[in-house]
Image (cartoon, helix red, strand yellow):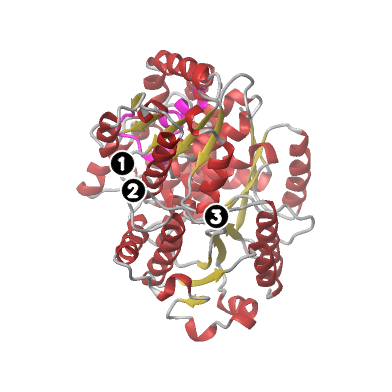
């Protein structure tokens, strides 16, 4: 894997490397010394329990024959595999799915990380449940999104005539979880247990990433062996100045701490765009806390002659594809404009495993420079708690009016926000180091996705700010931690909506649509409680048309 940096980036990287050398990072990290990040006993005791990912490729390779044998068995029986998971349980499989594509003769992989009923319904329409293997992936086993998906698809498998529906399900989880018990009770076809000392966003090379990849026909043994080989260049024997993982970590940390550039902007060709989603979660959830944070910006349209603010730094993830030529040309323009740029070049697809590992180590190194714990997520629970309270009301037949209120604004800005002047009102909220985030809880059919992209571009062009974008509830398990844990640098626009076709969740007194909109309202309340500037708009059908009307307000 090749790494290059322009002269400005080289100087910043050296600043970060000096900091890492002073911390003795390369020695202490591999010795699992938690004092790199925190000094208090409670934090240190927590951190040492979440460093099992460092050489997880060895653990996975020791069990790879079992994975490959099961994949061969599944290949004979199933036409589709659906991953039911969130965050770290779903984003690595999504990268494998899009980067490698459908493999001839193997089941097609679908990744479902949503409660939006039109999205769930679209996945259902693509499959025959009797010929589909469902992968219930959850570290804890108690996450509401995959639990709801499981309840729905288990019934769909039964309706398809399968007499032993557990045969169409496997579980990936930690030992001793409720999911392991459920899988045994329902007689799942297979249970894959993961090491408990790996956090979800660091789990790409464990069973959570490797099992779905194997089931779609990726040569995961080759991928892991290449990752192990390249990992030697990231290890304690490699000087910091020659270590690509630490160069990236030094760049991320020094840009944020020393240069006041906290907007990590990822430049990715179309064939590698979903890696940006995975890296976005890793960086945002790991660093966005204690009033600090590296703000990852993934999926922005690369516009010619765009005048980026000086709060940006850039990482180009290069694949050498035809589309990457477009990205490379734009990256050159950005550096000519005086911005720091680091390029990571993946020379063949099977270096993907090494790329995962490189980013994980880099994020741990950046966390040491920021003096935060990159392995906890102290603010994620808030939105879950708010959502649970709303669902309790729904189950009791009490639908809060706020769920479908046309417009809500946090208390501190409520008197400044009006729908007919929304664009100008939002501009007036922005301060010097702010970003915006557009967070829709909708299904991205072609027209809706096009309309949302146009909205993001319009906001970016009008404000000249970084504009984050994330579908709900996916982003709750990704950038949601940053939104609530950073230095209050965001202005948030949540978009909830009525679905075209709602779906009942078996065993619950609420639907997928009600759950999804409860999650949107729950996050609005959690952001408001943290003193964030947040606006929630509830859209009606047709979505694309109404999103266009919203865009016109800017």
Comparing 318 with 171, the one in front is: 171
How far, Cα to Cα, is label 2 from label 3?
21 Å
Q: Secondary structure at mark 1?
A: loop
Comparing 533 with 134, the one in front is: 134
Q: Secondary structure at mark 3?
A: loop
How far, Cα to Cα, is label 2 from label 1?
14 Å
Q: Any magenta on residue 154? A: no
Other-residue count near label 2 (Cα within 10 Å), few / some / many at <14 / 14–19 / ≥20 = some
Which mark is on residue 376?
Answer: 2
Decide: marks 2, 3 in contact (CB < 8 A)?
no
Report the residue at 43% width, 59% height from top. 292
Magenta stretch bounds = 193-214
Comparing 339 with 551, the one in front is: 551
Which mark is on residue 140?
Answer: 1
Which mark is on residue 470?
Answer: 3
In the picture, which quadrant includes the C terminus? Answer: bottom right
Q: Is residue 449 visible to us here? A: yes
Q: Position of residue 48 (x, y in %)?
A: 27, 37
Q: Identify whether 274 is placed above or below 103.
A: below
Q: Position of residue 415 (x, y in %)?
A: 50, 86
Report the residue at 38% width, 17% height from top. 63
Q: Is residue 225 visible to us here? A: no
Other-residue count near label 1 (Cα within 10 Å), few / some / many at <14 / 14–19 / ≥20 = some
Q: Earlier in the sequence, mark 1 or mark 3?
A: 1
Decide: marks 2, 1 in contact (CB < 8 A)?
no
């Amino acid at each position: 894997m090749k790494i290059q940096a322009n002269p400005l980036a080289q100087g910043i990287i050296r600043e970060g490397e000096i900091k890492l050398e002073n911390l003795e990072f390369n020695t202490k990290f591999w010795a699992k010394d938690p004092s790199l990040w925190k000094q208090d006993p409670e934090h240190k005791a927590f951190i040492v329990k979440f460093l099992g990912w460092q050489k997880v490729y060895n653990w996975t390779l020791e069990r790879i024959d079992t994975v490959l044998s099961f994949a061969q068995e599944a290949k004979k029986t199933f036409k589709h595999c659906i991953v039911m998971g969130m965050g770290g349980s779903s984003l690595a499989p999504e990268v494998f799915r899009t980067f490698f594509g459908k493999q001839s003769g193997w089941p097609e992989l679908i990744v479902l990380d949503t409660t939006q009923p039109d999205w769930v319904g679209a996945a259902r329409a693509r499959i025959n449940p009797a010929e589909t293997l469902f992968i219930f992936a959850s570290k804890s086993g108690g996450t509401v999104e995959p639990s709801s998906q499981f309840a729905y698809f288990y019934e769909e498998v039964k309706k398809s005539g399968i007499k032993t529906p557990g045969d169409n399900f496997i579980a990936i989880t930690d030992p001793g979880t409720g999911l392991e018990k459920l899988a045994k009770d329902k007689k799942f076809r297979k249970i894959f247990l993961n090491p408990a000392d790996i956090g979800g966003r660091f789990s790409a090379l464990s069973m959570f990433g490797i099992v779905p990849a194997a089931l779609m026909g990726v040569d995961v043994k080759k991928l892991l062996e290449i990752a192990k080989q390249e990992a030697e260049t990231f290890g304690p024997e490699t000087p910091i100045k020659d270590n690509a993982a630490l160069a990236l970590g030094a760049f991320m940390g020094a840009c944020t701490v020393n240069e006041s550039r906290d907007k990590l902007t990822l430049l990715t060709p179309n064939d590698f765009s979903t890696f940006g989603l995975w890296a976005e979660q890793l960086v945002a959830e790991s660093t966005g806390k204690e009033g600090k944070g590296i703000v990852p910006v993934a999926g922005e349209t690369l516009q010619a002659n765009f005048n980026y603010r000086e709060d940006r730094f850039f990482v180009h993830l290069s694949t050498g594809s035809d589309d990457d030529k477009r990205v490379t040309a734009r990256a050159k323009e950005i550096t000519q404009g005086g911005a720091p740029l680091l390029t990571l070049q993946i020379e063949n697809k099977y270096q993907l495993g090494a790329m995962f590992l490189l980013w994980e180590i880099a994020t741990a190194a950046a966390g040491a420079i920021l003096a935060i714990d990159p392995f906890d997520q102290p603010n994620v629970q808030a939105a879950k708690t708010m959502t649970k309270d709303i669902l309790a009301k729904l189950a009791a037949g009490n639908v809060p009016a706020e769920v479908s209120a046309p417009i809500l604004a946090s208390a501190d800005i409520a008197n400044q926000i009006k729908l007919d002047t929304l664009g100008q009102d939002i501009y007036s909220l922005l301060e010097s180091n702010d970003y915006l985030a557009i967070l829709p809880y909708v299904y991205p059919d072609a027209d809706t996705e096009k309309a949302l992209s146009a909205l993001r571009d319009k906001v970016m062009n009008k404000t000249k700010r970084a504009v984050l974008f994330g579908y709900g509830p996916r982003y709750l398990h990704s950038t949601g931690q940053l939104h609530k844990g950073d230095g209050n640098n965001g202005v948030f626009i949540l978009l909830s909506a009525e679905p075209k076709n709602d779906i009942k969740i078996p065993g619950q007194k609420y639907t997928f649509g009600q759950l999804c909109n409860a999650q949107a309202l729950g996050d609005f309340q959690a952001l408001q409680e943290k003193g964030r500037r947040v606006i929630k708009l509830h859209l009606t059908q047709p979505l694309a048309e109404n999103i266009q009307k919203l865009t016109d307000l800017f």
